[in-house]
Structure formats: C-alpha cells, structure tokens
Amino acid sequence: MSGFFKSSIGRKVAMALSAFFLMFFLLQHFVINSLSVFSAELFNEVSHFMGTNWLIQFVLQPVLIFGVVFHFVMGFVLELKNKSARKISYAKNNGAANSSWMSRNMIWSGLAILAFIVLHFIDFWFPEINTKFIKGDWSGVHEGVEGYRYFHELQGKFVSPIRVAAYALAFVFLALHLFHGFTSAFQSMGATAGRKKTLQNIGKAYSIIIPVGFIIIAVFHHLNHH
Amino acid sequence: MNLTLKIWRQKDSQSKGQMVDYKVTDISEHMSFLEMMDVLNEQLVNAGEEPVAFDHDCREGICGMCSMYINGEAHGPDRGVTTCQLHMRMFKDGDTITIEPFRAAAFPVIKDLVVDRSSFERIQQAGGYISVNTSGNTQDANAIPISKHAADEAMDAATCIGCGACVATCKNSSAMLFVGAKVSQYALLPQGQVEAVDRVKNMVAQMDLEGFGNCTNTGACEVECPKGISLDNIARMNRELMKASLK
C-alpha cells in the first residue's frame, strides 16, 4: 500500500482524503459559529467544551493541524510537479474553452486561503494556545466579562469593518476553491460514477452555503457588537 | 479566405524553435485544416523554403496521428473532431491562426509540429493488452456472455485513438484520460480480469515514469477529446488501482 501513495493516483487520493477531513472540519466549525447568532450562552458552552475537552485538544487538534499542513504541502508539491510536466508553455492557450476558472486556479485560491489561515491563527488560535498551554488558564473566563469569554472575544474581532471585509474576501476564495474541490475529491476517489450530477449539486450547495454562512455570521456580529 | 498563420518552427529536437508568420490566400471554407496546411506547404516548396512538418495519416479521424494546438485548443475550436476533420469554415476571412505542437515534456518535439508520442506506446506495452493462450482450445470471445451496458462502456473507452489531445490540453500535461480509457476497456470485460491487478499497476507506473503530470480533474481533456472519452474512465482507473493495491 505504501507504493500506492507514491504513485500519481495515490497522491491524488491522499489529497482527496485530507480534503474530506478538512471539509468535515469546516462544516462542524460553521455549525458551532452559527450558534453565536442565535444564543451567546449556547455558543459559550459549546466553545468551552471544544476548547477544554482533552480528546479534541490533544488528539483531534493535532490531527487537524497535520491535515491542513499536509493538504497545503502536497498541493504545492503536486503543482510544482505538474508545472515541470510542460517545459515550454503555449504561445496561445484558451483554457476557458474547456474548463472552469476555479479548476485551473486551485493553487491561487488555496494560497488566498493559506493567507487567511495565517491571519486566523494570529487572531484566534495563537491567543488560545497562549492562554491555555502557556499561561495554563483553562477556566474560559476573563476578568470583567460575565460568563465565558468566547462570545465576547468573537464580537470584539468583528468590530473593525476592514477585518470583516478581509474575512469576507477570504471566504469568497474558499467558495471558489470548494466549487471545484468538492466534486474533484470524489472524482479522485473514483466515487463519481453514476452520481456525478448529484455530487456536483451537493458540491455547489456546500461551496456556497458554508462560505456565505460564515460571511453572514461576521457581518451579523459587526452590526450587533456591544 | 485570406489568413495569417503563426506557426511553431523547430529544425529538430535539439534546436530552439520559434513562432513564424505566414500568409495564405484563397483558402476555401470547405477545405480541411490539413488541406490548408498542404496549400501552405506547396507555397513554401515553390518558394524554395522548408515545408512545415506535421503528423497526418488517415485524414478521416480514426488513426490518431494528426495533432496541432490551434488557437489555444487541441485539434482546434471544433468539438469531437481531430485536426484532419476540422474545417476552415470554423474560421473567418482575415483571421490570425496560431498553430503549435502538442506540448508536454513526455511529448518532445521532433520537428516543427511533429511530436514524439511513443510514451503512449510504452504505457500500452506495460499492460494495455490481454494475453491469449493459443493452446488450441481457446474459447471464442463471443461465447462469453457480457451485458450490453458493460460492452457499450468498454467500446466507448476503446474508441480512444491515442492522439494525445488530453495531454496537450491538460494544464498539468496529465495522461490520465488516455490511461484511464485503456485500463477501462479491459476492466469492464471478463477477459480483462485475469491480468487486471498487474495491468493497472504497471500502466500507472509507466505513466508516472514518462513524466506526465497529475490529474486535477479540470475536465479539459474530456471536452477536447475527439472521441468524447469520459472522465468516468479516470475514476474507474483510480478505483482499479486502489483495489489492486489492496490485493
């Protein structure tokens, strides 16, 4: 089986498997974030559970980081290999005649998402790691904040309209990436036969609903911060 | 019609090539693209110049020899045709047409628009066949019942003429549509089952060895394929390799 993952198809399958994992992560992240629109208390409770549960923090979180790093590194490796498969470019190439912009520019939408993840880590993840793993504060409370601190921190991040705009732009790139990536992952797994149209429709729904949902959540908190 | 042609000229595989402009006049819209190239070459020969080298054989869309990347598309702007079936009525009087060889590291240019596609032959030799034991009691292939659906799908895959348009049009120069079709035409039939594991493993290994890129499922190959080979064949090849790797 190790030989399989060294082959071109094996690498496609590895990309698809990491994509499935990331798409599942994105879905649960979206569900939890959307709770913040309906109930601050519920969002705080779920966030505290996610942030302090040992299985999530010490098992799933490292798996997630590995999944993200693997998807990006493998994406770049494959892009470089693919570039080297054509030494001389065409003087005239009409890519739009036979394929979508999204499918031809996965590396660029991926790079935009990577830039967003760096921003997201600076914004949310590094302060969380600092609070819990360096300061050792697992209480989830903050001085001067009633109840858990998570909802308060979330609203604080969306006060700036520039940050909301940057956030929205990143999710547009995520939508473009998913628009091709969702069905592509199933195709790589060889799972599209007889259900391509259905998968394409589910893929379109997923790649629009999730990113637009995240943007709505950001705009909602920008308009409703106290 | 009168046309300006921008054609890739390259003396041999070692030389550096370049785009060269030519004018052709009085081209009939009923001509095939290759007939238009013949007119250009006649003009060049009469002027004492080297004619443009290009691959062609049957000129009826079944041999897979003609190639050419015309105005940014493999086999030109028409669909479901090879270059020899492309007609000049697809262009307008006064047009400038860019003509390049199929580009891929695994398809090195031999001269002008002629590329070496023997990498496809080596992939075929790695497993694109069924070994028949001709011991004297070989069963007639027609005696084995095969469902209509499987036979049709196998036949669809087998219509691949190995022209290389899939590689030429793919942004990654991937050969997976070709290899997928060649794997599928046997994977769908009972006769192909005996050697199925070795076939897909060896053909994919040879494909990787030849330096083709990875498929990123853009679907460009399916659109440009003159025989309409479906992406389903790539999915089937992926499944076949996964199954073979687990055995």
Image (spheres, rainbow, N blue to C red):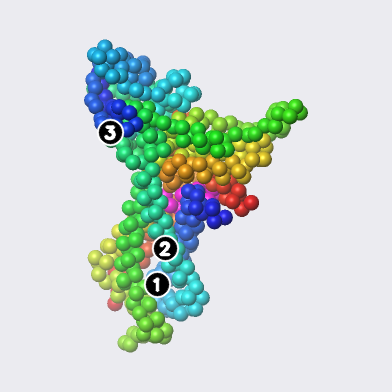
Question: Of circles 1 and 3, which is in front?
Answer: 3
Is A125 displayed left or right of B231 in the figure?
Answer: left
Query: Vertically, is B230 above or below A29?
Result: above
Whether residue B90 is visible to the viewer of this picture, yes or no, is yes
Q: Chain of mark 1?
A: A
Measured Cα–Cα span from mark 1 to mark 3: 62 Å
User: Could you tell me if the residues under marks 1 and 3 are in contact, i.e. CB atoms within 8 Å?
Assistant: no
Residue sitting at the far right: B137
Q: Secondary structure at mark 1?
A: helix
- State the residue position of label 2: A68
- Three-letter code for the amino acid on which mark 3 is drawn: Lys
Q: Does label 1 lie on the same chain as label 2?
A: yes
Q: Does label 3 lie on the same chain as label 2?
A: no
Task: Point out residue A5 in the picture as x, y percentages from the top left corner.
Answer: 51, 54
Whether residue B230 is visible to the viewer of this picture, yes or no, is no
10 Å neighbourhood of mark 1: few (<14), some, or many (≥20)?
A: many
Q: Is residue A184 magenta?
A: yes
Question: In the image, which residues are magenta?
Answer: A180-192
- Three-letter code for the amino acid on which mark 1 is drawn: Ser
Q: Chain of mark 2?
A: A
Q: Secondary structure at mark 3?
A: loop
- State the residue position of label 1: A36
Quadrant placement of the N terminus of chain B: top left
Q: State the residue in front, B231 or A200.
A: B231
Q: Does label 3 lie on the same chain as label 1?
A: no
Residue sitting at the far bottom: A143
